[in-house]
Amino acid sequence: MRAPRLLDPVAASARPRRFAWGRATLAASAVVAAALASIPLVYLVVRVAGAESGAVAETLLRPRTAQLAANTVGLVAAVSVACLVLGVATAWVLARTDLPLRRTWTVLAALPLAIPSYVAAFGWVALTPVRGFWGSLIVLTLCNVPLVTLPTLAALRQADRAQEDVARTLGRSRTRAFAEVTWPQVRPAALAGVLLVALYVLSDFGAVALMRFQAFTWAIHAAYTSSFDPTLAAVMATVLAAMGVALVVAERAMRGRQTRFGSTVAARGTVQPVVLGPWRVPVQVALAAIAALSLGVPLGALLRYLGSQPSSGTVVSAGDVAADALTTVGLAAAGALIALALALPIGILAARHPSRLATGAESASYVGLALPGIVVGLSLVYFSLQVVPALYQSVWILAFAYGVLFLPKAVGAVRSSIERVEPGLEDVARTLGSGVAGTWMRVTARIAAPGIGAGALLVALTAMKELPATLLLRPTTTDTLATSLWRLTDISAYAAAAPYALALVVVAAVPVVLLTREAVAGATRVEEFE
């Protein structure tokens, strides 16, 4: 038998310095990543600082700004609450009950992520009379509720159900046992999803524009495109960024610390699912109604126009659609890789070394998602022309824009995935002689890889649907499915635009299916147990 390896005392004494050096490098990398993610905010500060103080004060104090702020806050709050209620309820039904066809319902619950909000809004405008606040609320809720459902579903399947059963045996009702025992375990995942929903609604333009609801993004686009008033638009965008920072701070305060309960996998697997009984049919009807509203309405509108005759001069070939689809996938993949590269140091620092620096870096990474795509696009146009002119209107600056815009999705995935890795496993690897990089590759990265990969897929999925930044930053000879769809709908060529919209939904459905793979596997394990 091989003798145990003795650690070199000199190497052992040098290890703390090596770990300290690794932590300093990690912190420096996080600062650089946060600085790159803050380029849009720096652009806004430069614009506002260069404007006359009287003009800034006039913009902030006018009644119109207060009305836009009230409209935006009301819509964000309503969509966030609706997604939280629907998402947690759907996740609980899928994870904890004897619902038939659980795998099918899980996929249907996630597929609305493949529908861009402007496509969904177009479907509702084409087929229904719903407009304004209520139309925006319905469309944005249906498109974004999977952002709460999927992480809550994963958290429920990892939660300690035995503790809930103990609470039930002590006389707690099912609702009270869930609130006191299970909710603290799944709250961080649910609130992280709600934060993504709130930031998305804050920055959405397509849905509110089609629904004719006057939110901040609508006014910002009007200021840039109609009157081209950069000061007015920059001031309103700065207010929007402040709202985004406030949302991040509020989510962190409500999230609290991750509640850990000790239990074994075996103990979790012996818990019987809740029997729906007479509620089985109403629950399935409710799930079917949500799927019909979120998928059926927009797809129905697309199929309606797909079957009509395109106007002269707007005939679309399958080759054109396929070429735009390949460009869309390539740019989205590049954006996901950039987002992941920026997110890794921030997420690792936030998960393993909580501090003011980590909090600041994580908060800075969320600013881009709170800003409209047109603001991020203009900020990167300014940055590329002033700093690196060679990147102007290149695919690289567009991919970088995707990385900045959707960085929060990657940061959240990296942080939560690494938080689930037991620190003791890393300590054991270090005592056996592994350095910082070795411990990361052999232990942390292997365990956290599925969650980190899911974050990258989510970034790619969202980048496929991004429109305003793509219109500003793409090379003049490059088209994506979103830009071709916008170009044709802008001239009312809806029949010609339908193939691009349908192709965008199909392409976006691929990462959605991959994201639901683990959830479907969990549903399969539950069905096999039953």
Image (tube, rainbow, N blue to C red):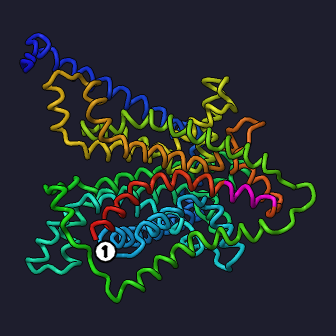
Q: Residue at x 24, y 42 (%)?
A: 421
Q: Residues within 10 Å of mark 1 (few under 14, many from 20)?
A: some
Q: Quadrant of residue 222?
A: bottom right
Residue 315 in percent (x, y) is at 87, 55
Residue 83 in percent (x, y) is at 44, 68
Residue 390 in percent (x, y) is at 67, 23
Q: Residue at x 45, y 37 (%)?
A: 340
Compare residues 511 and 486 and report the one nearer the observer.
Answer: 511
User: Which residue is disc 1 drawn over?
Assistant: 97
Compare residues 360 and 528 and report the one nearer the observer.
Answer: 528
Q: Quadrant of residue 47?
A: top right
| Above or below, comparing residue 179 to residue 380 in the picture | below
Q: Quadrant of the C terminus?
A: bottom left
| Above or below, comparing residue 82 to residue 40 in the picture | below
Q: Which residues are magenta?
A: 496-503
Q: Quadrant of the N terminus?
A: top left
